[in-house]
Amino acid sequence: MLKRVLAVAVGAASLTMFSGASANTFSISELLQVGASLPKIGDLASGSNLDASSGTITLNDGSQLLIRTKDGSPLSSAVGSNNTTLLADGREFSVRTSASSLEDAYNNSATPASFTVSAVVDSRVVSLDWDGPLDAVETESTFQARLNGQPVTFVLPEGTTLADFDGNTRFRLLDQNGNDLLEETTLNEVSADQINKLAAAIGALNADKSIAAAQRQAMVYNFGLIADQINHAMQPGSRLSQGPQSVDGTRFSFGQGLNAWVGSEIGNTSGDSAGMGYDADTKTAMFGVDARIDNMLAGVAVGYSNFDMTSNFGRSSLSGNLIAPYGAVALLDGNLVLDAILLYQDLDGSFDFGQPTDWSGDRWGARVAGTYYLPRFADDMLLAGLTAGAAYLNDDLDDSYGNDYGVELGEAFVGGRLIADFGLGSIWTSLTYFEEVSSDFDRNADLLGNDDDNRFEVKVGASHQLGTNMDFSIAAKTTVGSSDTDYDAVQMSLVYQF
């Protein structure tokens, strides 16, 4: 899911911390020290250093840090602005203030002003906002701020200021209700699990949550049309079959032969992705060709799907073209059907939460299932089948800033299906339970989902033979009961038999 460990904390200037930082991002202690030493940057742009584009500051731990402008302009020009981007040993961070300039904030450090500091740390953009005097770094032990828009309070021991802070200083991090985001600890003691949970709580993973929400819906929509085509093609036949090539089948069970089909599905979905409430519209369209030879089915589908989401943290969209080879085999006189679907999709999209970005990448997936059909009953009018299986999706995306996002999703499912034949058509219904199993192979999966990611799906459909070689079907599906993933959708398909 996450390619690297992500972490966030808070301080008066840039008290934003991450672990596992790469060469292009900040380590915990470095970024923390940059924040605490922010007022010292103003000293680099004064006196004889007015034209200098870089300078070295001494941090609280005695180490030195090279500060320079991004474009080679004088530091005095940078601090003369109220919105500037600087490099600390080659790593970029931005500072904004409500004062007329950073220089004014430095010279009037006791005057309250608003500040925003942001940086990319371990591939995630994190911003810190706070209101207060700049010299609070050297006078206060409690700081109220906002991390990615979420109010937090950073509490140091009495008599300790941010200027004294290092990896062994004990601290607490509280949310807006006074609850511990991090219980009393030190930077050196914080675990990866604590850091990841903190990152999720203050919104650093909102883009990841958005991708996870889109992926959960893709699991619903991308496999559904193909799975239904397999079910119709492989279900055991009855004496009511009217297909011209039928040797054993109902509506789509045409025995030997080639089929071409088109299908589409539109729906509305809503849910909660670890505190990120969302509502979205989904669209899927596919074209497929398959052939049944004796007890085997082989085919391929191509199509397009789109997910357009509005959440309480911003807007996002994700769409792309897909290709999905599939196949099935019938055993035990056709009563046991095993099927599999492979899926590849190229993805493009966008995400707008404070800092808009574009996404591009791909999605890989697979679904396997087994269906056992019970003997027909009610004068051969009714057929019942029991299905169990699993599905997996892996999204790998890059944003326009070069940051990498990876999200995995696994589900197991079990359900039942009842089909009733009526001359030239049939009606059917199914009830399926889906259990998310992502955390079994990804220890960070809970950060992007809630405890109630499982769901029951009810589906009702009808089909009718339009001619000797063509069939039309329509179906609707929805979730029932309590779930963090809710959706309603309608799908239609048309099949032609050669």
Image: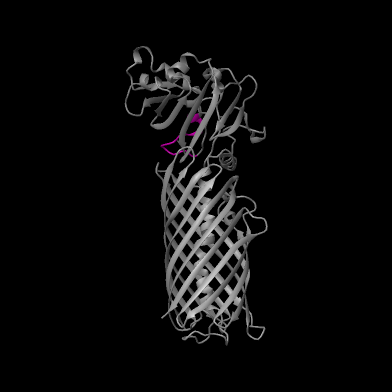
Residue at point 54% right, 63% down? 490
Question: Residue 359's x, y, as percent?
Answer: 42, 48
Asked whether residue 82 appears in the rendered view, the answer is yes
Q: Is residue 25 magenta?
A: yes
Q: Main secondary structure of the magenta part?
A: loop
Instruction: Say above or below: 98 vs 197.
Output: above
Q: Is residue 407 magenta?
A: no
Asked whether residue 1 appears in the rendered view, the answer is no
- Which image quarter: residue 300? bottom left
Q: Which residues are magenta?
A: 20-31
Question: Residue 46's x, y, as percent?
Answer: 38, 14
Instruction: Say above or below: 202 vs 494.
Output: above
For this orientation, the residue located farthest to the top is 47
Q: Is residue 28 or residue 168 the one in the foreground?
A: 28
Q: Is residue 68 or residue 491 the one in the foreground?
A: 491
The quadrant of the image that shows the C terminus is: bottom left
Instruction: Say above or below: 452 vs 106.
Output: below
Question: Residue 264's x, y, as percent?
Answer: 48, 65
